[in-house]
Image (tube, rainbow, N blue to C red):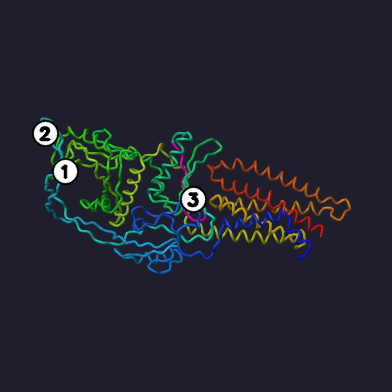
Amino acid sequence: MNYTTKKMLTNWRVILVFITLLLAVVAISPNPYADGVAIRSITMNSSASSAGIESSKPTAAPMTRERIISMNNIPIHNMSDYYNFVDTLEPNRTIQIKTNKGMYQLVTQPLLKITILNETEQKIINETIFVNETINGTVQLVEKIVEKTIIVNKTRSEIIGTEDLGLVVYDAPTTNLRKGLDLQGGTRVLLAPEEKLDSDNMDILLENMKYRLNVYGLSDVVVREVGDLSGNQYILVEIAGANEQEVKDLMSKQGKFEAKISNDTVFKGGGDITHVCRTAQCSGIDPSSGCGMSGDLWVCRFMFSISLSPEAAQKQADLTRNLDVITENGEDYLTEKIYLYLDDEQVDELNIGADLKGRAVTDIAISGSGSGQTEQEAIFNSLANMKKLQTVLITGSLPVKLNIIKTDNISPSLGNEFVKSALIMGLLSLVAVLLILMIRYRKLKLVIPMIITSIVESVALLGVAAVIGWNLDLAAIAGIIIAVGTGINDQIVITDEALRGEKSEAYDWKKKIKNAFFIVMGSYFTMGVAMIPLMFAGAGLLKGFALTTVIGFSIGVFITRPAYAAIIELLTKE
């Protein structure tokens, strides 16, 4: 080791660069040999959920996420292996799943088709009723159990496949760098509230939206407030791996659910509902109605049970107490129906059984329907509509109605192409810069430190992104390119100032570097002022570009470029 190299390695500015590089690599945690598929989210009440598998928190580092390594001792290396295994699953089979965090056993559930037979049968059931009795001279409401004969339709269940396991997975990450939607695929929705909200109501809205998306079974969710230079309020929702239409349907609805009798509200979604059943035992395709043809379409009805608060149940009793009883098709109903409204639009109407007259019943059933060109499509759409309605009933309405301004849906395959293109362009840019610098200086000992400094700045910037959990999208990649480009420019300024007049007797190296850093700092502050408006322009969609540019420039100005100046000093003296 010669004297110049020793002086470089012991210079405190160079040591600071090495420490920064080491910390960045630790933060990124690269592991190109990571195997398996990472779990993105778990659907509630699914086989995976029942087995105890939990979704990772959206803020969890990618390398800490649970990864499926094998299923029934069959290695799972990637998405292709996973789906090839899942496609062979049969109902009512036990699956052993091995992950990097433990072992799980789950049982596959059959997907049923309900068929209504042209037969009926009598069935005797026990029913709880409340009657007035005089006890010790006082009229009291007494609970009694009586037998009741009902006519039911005969149904036949046919297994037509296997229900989804409830696992949403993706190829195991190899670093802690978070890919934005541009790079991994997903849905981005920009929404605007119909009225301006203060900070407290905006916080409530954001939390409610996150809760609604999580209840629906979506994770990796980013929900944040953004704005523009005109002072408009927006909410930006980014969901990795989600379908565009289901997100639009879920977010465009305020979710104001009401059940009415004679224009009087009986109960609302949220506070009036204490429980919504989402298990197969009390939700799914309604066995009393099933599926059938309506014109050219198949229509399937769904049903699930809910529990009302005592106050809502009493209100229902008060509103039905004075209604008359009518008979339709051999069944006794009240003269008024209960109408279900979602965002002030009627979505269903249900008959009220005569036995519910004046009774404060807390457990009731909600139904609806879905249609499709085929029976299978109708079943799928019916269950999807049921899931959305259940989500709205659980979470209640949003504080304000939201309007969709813009939606973007990017496929995962397109995101992979973006990553490949970015890496290729980065490599070509590095080669082009190397050639230009060699033509300009014709000294390899000056060019190599420039290239190494640029690489260190890029790695350090990626390390910061990994630490703060910033999603890398196309805008952020553009910011990285700008930061590295300006870094090369500043190094050229430092090098030219250091070399100018180096052979003269009046050569003052410190003054030359001081002049160079005066230019560098002027450029830094100019860039900072220019990036501030971009933080807010375009409803925050350019924030990634502005943030990465500022961070990259700051790392260069305060860490790498002083070290490069120290290296140039030693090289020029040599």
Farthest residue to the bottom: give it. 74
Query: From which residue to which does the magenta span run?
Result: 181-193
252 sits left or right of 121 in the view: right
Farthest residue to the right: give it. 505
Q: Earlier in the sequence, mark 1 or mark 3?
A: 3
Which residue, given by chain and number where applicable, does mark 2 sit on?
135
* Mark 2 neighbour density, 10 Å: few (under 14) some (14–19) many (20 or more): few
Q: Quadrant of residue 1?
A: bottom right
Q: Earlier in the sequence, mark 1 or mark 2?
A: 1
Instruction: Look at the image and tell me in which quarter the C terminus lies.
Output: bottom right
Q: CA distance from mark 3 to mark 2?
A: 62 Å
> Badges 1 and 2: C-beta atoms under 8 Å apart?
no
Q: Is residue 354 above or below residue 35?
A: above
Q: CA distance from mark 1 to mark 2?
A: 20 Å
* Mark 3 neighbour density, 10 Å: few (under 14) some (14–19) many (20 or more): few
Q: CA distance from mark 1 to mark 3?
A: 49 Å
Q: Tell me the amino acid under the disc marked 3.
A: Thr
| Magenta portion: prevailing SS class | strand
Check if residue 310 falls in the magenta segment.
no
Residue occupying image coordinates x 63% and y 61%: 427
Farthest residue to the top: give it. 137
Q: Tell me the amino acid under the disc marked 2.
A: Ile
Q: Which mark is residue 59?
A: 3
Which residue, given by chain and number where applicable, does mark 1 sit on?
128
User: x and y percent of residue 362 in the render?
Assistant: 24, 41
SS at mark 3 in the image: loop
User: x and y percent of residue 560 in the render?
Assistant: 69, 53
Q: Earlier in the sequence, mark 3 or mark 2?
A: 3
> Badges 3 and 2: C-beta atoms under 8 Å apart?
no
User: x and y percent of residue 23 in the render?
Assistant: 61, 55
Depth check: give the residue in front, 501 or 422: 501
Q: Quadrant of residue 145?
A: top left
